Amino acid sequence: MSRITAAFQEKRALIAFITGGDPDIETTKDLIPAMAEAGADIIEIGIPFSDPIAEGPAIQAASLRALTSGTTVDKLFDMVQEIRQSVRIPLLFMTYANPVFAYGTERFLQRCSDCGIDGLIIPDVPYEEKEEFSPFCKQYGITLISQAVPAFEERAAMIAASAEGFVYCMPASGTANSPIEASAEAINKLKHTVSIPCAVEIDNTVPEQGNAVIDCSDGLILGNQIVKIMDEHKQNCIPFVKAYLKRVKKNYSVQ
């Protein structure tokens, strides 16, 4: 059983996003083990990029801070390899196609494997073009996570049919700052088409944002609020992020 599959066993998984290198690599290195200790079941590490078109203003600003601090892809690989000695939960990279191409696709996936990354999310690569990456992912044992918008039922079902690990269910707008427009009914329909979990991206700053959607999900994907906490507290963010994750676990019974 893969680490990603195990993360969803008999519970709703809590999937937490941070931008790697925000505010600096050392903080990221200390934060990830702390998030795992606080109850994160999977952690997505965003690779900072100068044009993060699929992100809202908070994560765009985090990318800029990380790049300004000198974060590079190689530094993130080295950091993951170091923390992997103690962190046992799945670690995913979220990035864009251009950084992967610039690094060299096969070289990038090989380094992912070598340092202990479990999965890869590339939000600007449509379903029709994922074959540019999936052969290398398979070769190096990296799960290529598919994103789908449950509100667009026919296309979501097509994407989910070949998905691996879990289906990353997105808001209809495709940004982390917008409310989830897909209904619980649409998510439930999608879940009936796949044998893998469906995790929902949600902005937890609005607790009343569709408890029915939360209740039907196999996992909650949280990022926007975590990034805002990090922006507010910078290098002192770790206890505040831990407290937030523990609160989400308690409020939404992610256990």
Image: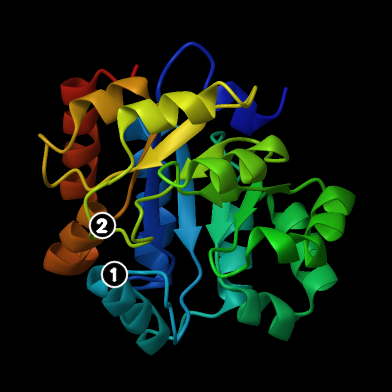
Establish if 94 lies above or below 59. Answer: above
Residue count near mark 2 (Cα–Cα under 10 Å), binned few <14, some 14–19, many ≥20: many
Q: Residue furthest top?
A: 10
Q: CA distance from mark 1 to mark 2?
A: 8 Å
The secondary element bearing badge 1 is classed as loop
| Percent of width and height locating residue 76 | 56, 68
Residue nearest the viewer, comparing 26 with 76: 76
Could you say which disc has been placed on residue 56 in the image? 1
Q: Amino acid at mark 2?
A: Asn
| Percent of width and height locating residue 169 | 45, 43
Is 163 placed left or right of 237 in the picture? right
Question: In this view of the protein, can residue 162 be seen by the observer?
Answer: yes
| Percent of width and height locating residue 172 | 36, 54
Residues at circles 1 and 2 in contact by the CB criterion of under 8 Å? yes
Which residue appears at 32% of the width and 76% of the height?
A: 60
Q: Earlier in the sequence, mark 1 or mark 2?
A: 1
